[in-house]
Image (cartoon, helix red, strand yellow):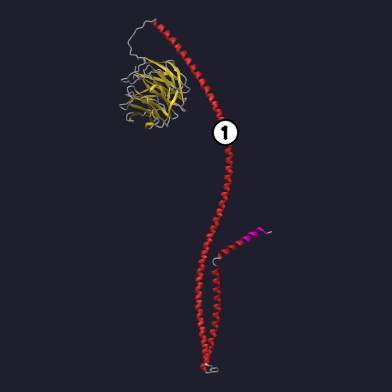
Amino acid sequence: MTTPTADWKQLIFQNLKARNRKETYEFADLIDSQNKLFEQVTALKSRNMQLTLETEKLKAENLSLQVRVDSGGPGGGVPNEKVQQLEQKLFKLHEELTEMHKKRGENAQQIIDLNAALKEKEKEILVKDGKLSDAHSTEQTLKNEMKNLERTILELEATNQTLKDEHQALQMAFTSLEEKHKKLMNDNDEIMARWLQQKMAQADALNRENDQFMAHKQRMLQKQLAEAALEPVTVTEQTSDIAGIPQICLNASIPTKAQQKLDAHEGEVNAVLWSPTGTMFATGGSDRKIKLWDFSLGQCQCKGFLAGSNAGITSLEYDIDEANILGASNDYACRLWSLSDLRLRHTLTGHSGKVLSAKFLGESSKVVSGSHDRTLKIWDLHTKACSKTIFAGSSCNDLVTLHGTHIISGHFDKRIRFWDTRSDNTSNEIGLQGRITSLSLSPDRMSLLACTREDTLKVIDLRQNQVINTLCDENFKVASDWTRAVFSPDGTYVAAGSQDGTLFIWNIQKGKVEKTLKEHTHSILACSWHPAGSFILTSEKQKKVILWGDM
């Protein structure tokens, strides 16, 4: 049995023999011819040596013969024929020697040429050895890469099989989860149906409570009327408002003092709004209630509240007839209550984020709402359904309506967008330097007031669609993303509340602050100017609503 040592020695010997055969094959003829030339040179050298010896002998004999001839000694009578023969022989030997020298020179030149060719071939052999070594290295590298790729393929096949197994397991899990999802959706539908039934029951209970409240109030009113009928009455001329007719303001006055402070809600009072006639106003707070207040002779008195919202109220809007009031809230919905019986009439759900503003669109049967979910929705109160959804691209903080077909919305991305409800695309937009917190239309519908988080108010000319006035003050700071600013009823002034509880009133024509009023101890969130132009209502983050006047 052969040992491993003998095997690798035999392998090396065989590799050396193969390399020797490969490297000497191309030069075999050259080597043979060189060997033959070396043999010829050796033979010629020996022949040259013999001829040299013979020449020396002949020279010696010739010299001795000349000496004998000259001395006339013995042998001096050698015939001339022999001398001539020797001379001829010597001449031939000289010719042979010359020929041999000539051949020797030619052979030497040939040897030089062959040596040069041999060196060139050796250089070629060295180059080919280098190339062969590089080829061997490349071959070894490729073999190693091939082994690595084979290992990688095996690993990938194993990984692929693992992924197939995991995919199969995930597919089974997905199927199971899909079944669970279907079951949960069915359960959710059932829960939603029960929830809606409960909400309807709560609304019915609330309506019954309102009916009882209104009946009690009616009885009390009848009792008071009966008592008043027994008392003498002195009729005096008063300049009271005529019910149902909106106030007309020719010259607004700037309030000078806080006339009445009201604890309106438990927590933030996000919205406050005068009715079109100015005989009452409404407030909305984070306590989920809308409170209605009577206003007469400069005094306010709560006459009832509207319930039904599941989160804080963010916006309020009266219809033109003062028959209904619209409220937006943080529970992703907006609602409509009737003012005659204080009942909840419609709940409009469909947004996926807080509804920050809701307004009537031209007529009392259409409503548009703007939400934190970056959409505007138009609602038909006859069908109680959304008739159109507008994708605004950014959270809507406030909106106003114009001409019954146009909507102007203010957004978190610092842009005011103009929409035509008869098309799906925005007709125009204006970019400002801060997030839009509120929008307000001037009485003549020619100007738009925008409040921004950069602590400025921008007056925009709607005919030119450009900012014509910027109102600001170093002490004016906007408190939140839903701080509301308003025009005065005559369009001369602008009012907005600051973070430190100060009410700022600017003169638009002068572009300067006309008056500051400070009674609030917390940030002012909303304000509303009386239609007659003589009173302002402001609301703050902590319960209070203040009536400002100069009576």
- Magenta portion: prevailing SS class: helix
Mark 1 lies on a secondary structure that is helix
Is 328 in the magenta?
A: no
- The extreme right residue here reads 1
Looking at the rendered structure, the kind of residue marked 1 is Thr
What's the residue at 58%, 48% (across, down)?
151
Residue 95 locus on image (x, y percent): 50, 82
Q: Position of residue 496 (x, y in %)?
A: 37, 25
Residue 493 image-quadrant placement: top left
Residue depicted at 59% across the width and 39% down the height: 165
Number of numbered tags placed on the structure image: 1
Disc 1 crowd rating (10 Å Cα; few below 14, some 14-19, many 20+) is few
Residue at label 1?
A: 175
Q: Quadrant of residue 447?
A: top left
Relative vertical location of residue 40 with respect to residue 235 in this rendering, above or below: below
Of 156 and 547, the residue lying toward us: 156
Q: Nearer the viewer, residue 61 or 36?
A: 36
Residue at 45% over, 11% down = 215
The quadrant of the rendering that contains the N terminus is bottom right
Can residue 504 be seen in the rendering of this structure?
no
Q: Is residue 66 left or right of residue 381?
A: right
The front one of 504 and 367 is 367
Residue 261 percent coordinates (x, y): 40, 18
Instruction: Say whether residue 11 is magenta.
Output: yes
Q: Would residue 115 be visible to someone looking at this image?
A: yes
Q: Position of residue 280 (x, y in %)?
A: 39, 17
> Magenta residues, as a range?
2-12
In the picture, the quarter occupied by the C terminus is: top left
Q: Quadrant of residue 544?
A: top left
